[in-house]
Image (cartoon, grey):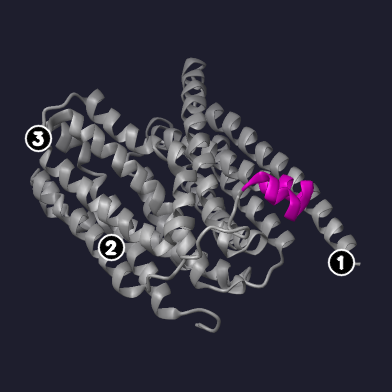
Amino acid sequence: MNYAGYRPRPLHSVYAARLLAGAAFSSMMPFVLLHFTETFKLTPVSAGSILSVQELMPVFTGMVAGWLVVRTGSRSLLGAALGLLGLTTWQWMNGDGGLKALWASAVVSGISFSALRVAFSSTVADLVEKEEASHAFAMLHAYTNVGMAVGPLLNSCWVSQKDYRNAFWVPIGLYLLASLVISLGISSDVGRGGEGPDSSFDLRRLRLEYGDWGLLFIAAVMLTMFFNGIRAQANIIGLAKYFTDYFHSTRATSMYWTVQSLAVVFLVPFGGRLVRNWDIKALFIAFVSGMAMIAGGFWTLGFFGPSRLSPAFASLIVLTVLGECLCVPCYGALLVNFLGKKRTGMAFGMASTIGALGMSVGASLAGVLLERSERIQSLPSYWQWIGPLCVGAFVVAFALGYIALYGYQKNRVAQEA
């Protein structure tokens, strides 16, 4: 591996912390609702609402997280967010303060998750040169998937014994260990550029620097993230039910996430290497194409009969993995190359907020379409509606962004002439 152009030790600390944070998150998912309902005797509605609050917070705090990156530095925000997640997880374990305290912890936890997503991406952008950004973001994604895959195994002995309280020590320890890794492995000046003209995300300043075409291109990238939020939530809601009720397989959903995660771990870094020296236009084309390919993978589920689980599963795996190989490394590299390092914190924060809004819309849309497909007794119609909607939306975003990028680059050539 060629480490020329960036500092390998700090970057490896980021990867290690991302793996630990992913493992901490996934280790809680199998039992956290059971802990609320069985240990604290909460109703399923109350328990679910606590997690819903946590998921909703990025809608309101993504831009704030981007602003904090500029003010405090990406390394400082990253360490603080990981530490807060450890503390809020400890509160969920003990339940001190009753239901109100659990809700308050969910709010803090959601804010911390929002900050974590922005800070990890911003820290990587701060540590690498533009040419290496695509590979670095691909590696960050791969380490995330490794952590997500191993997390549930780390506390399975306690979960299997329904000892949920002790099972919480695993995510608590992982979050705090990740915070320690960041504190010891990355210097405090990383990402600490302070506010200034080159770190501002003020629309008037951006318009002066990038022009109307440049602003339109940024809007197209954010629109793509909004559509991807809709797509992601719709796929999550429909997948498990479809595998169970249509293909009559209770194991296919977990098998999909396992196989897909393992494939991503091994293949996405190669995608990052492939696009390492691509220009902005090529990065944008690959970014949106990858998003559309993932949506197309789920669309294909609507065209296989109930006895053809294996080819449907293979089609889904191939298209979603190839899509991630394109869109994951290109997304971060695109923002870094177009906006520069100092603006990426605000850009990632905006994308986090817009993506969360898309997921909120996607949840409502998926619920309506799933109910309609059940009413007409045709589950494949769910994917036949969702697929064209999502792929068509990405085509619109691509057309808008391509035209805007053409105008932006044409203006730049004219100004330099």
The kind of secondary structure the magenta stretch mainly shows is helix
- The circle drawn on residue 179 is 2
Q: Which of marks 3 and 2 is nearer the N terminus?
A: 3
Q: Mark 3 points at which residue?
A: 39
Residue closer to the observer: 121 or 341? 341
- Eyeballing the image, is 109 above or below 337? above
Quadrant of the image occupied by residue 272: bottom right
Q: Marks 1/2: CA distance?
A: 46 Å
User: What type is the residue that disc 2 sits on?
Assistant: Ser
The answer to whether residue 402 is seen in the rendering is yes
Inspect the image, locate mark 3, and give the three-letter code of the amino acid beneath it: Thr
Toward the viewer: 240 or 103? 103
Question: Helix, strand, or loop for circle 1?
Answer: helix
Report the span colored magenta. 202-218
Q: Quadrant of residue 43?
A: top left
Mark 1, residue position:
416
Mark in front: 1 vs 2: 1
Q: Which of 375 and 392 is in front in this view?
A: 392
Residue at point 23%, 47% (across, down): 28
Expressed as whole percent of the image width and height from the top left, the position of residue 312 reads 51, 44
Question: Can you tell which of label 3 and label 1 is closer to the viewer?
Answer: 1
Question: Where does the image place residue 94, in percent across and percent down from the top left?
Answer: 10, 42
Cα separation between marks 3 and 1 = 67 Å
- Between the C-alphas of marks 3 and 2, the distance is 28 Å
Of callouts 1 and 2, which one flags the residue occurring earlier in the amino acid sequence? 2
For the residue carrying disc 1, how many other residues have a C-alpha within 10 Å: few (<14), some (14-19), or many (20+)?
A: few
Q: Tell me residue 136's x, y (percent).
A: 50, 69
Mark 3 and mark 1 lie on one chain; the one further toward the N terminus is 3
Which numbered circle lies on residue 89?
none
Question: How many discs mark residues in the rendered view?
Answer: 3
Q: Is residue 342 above or below residue 31?
A: below
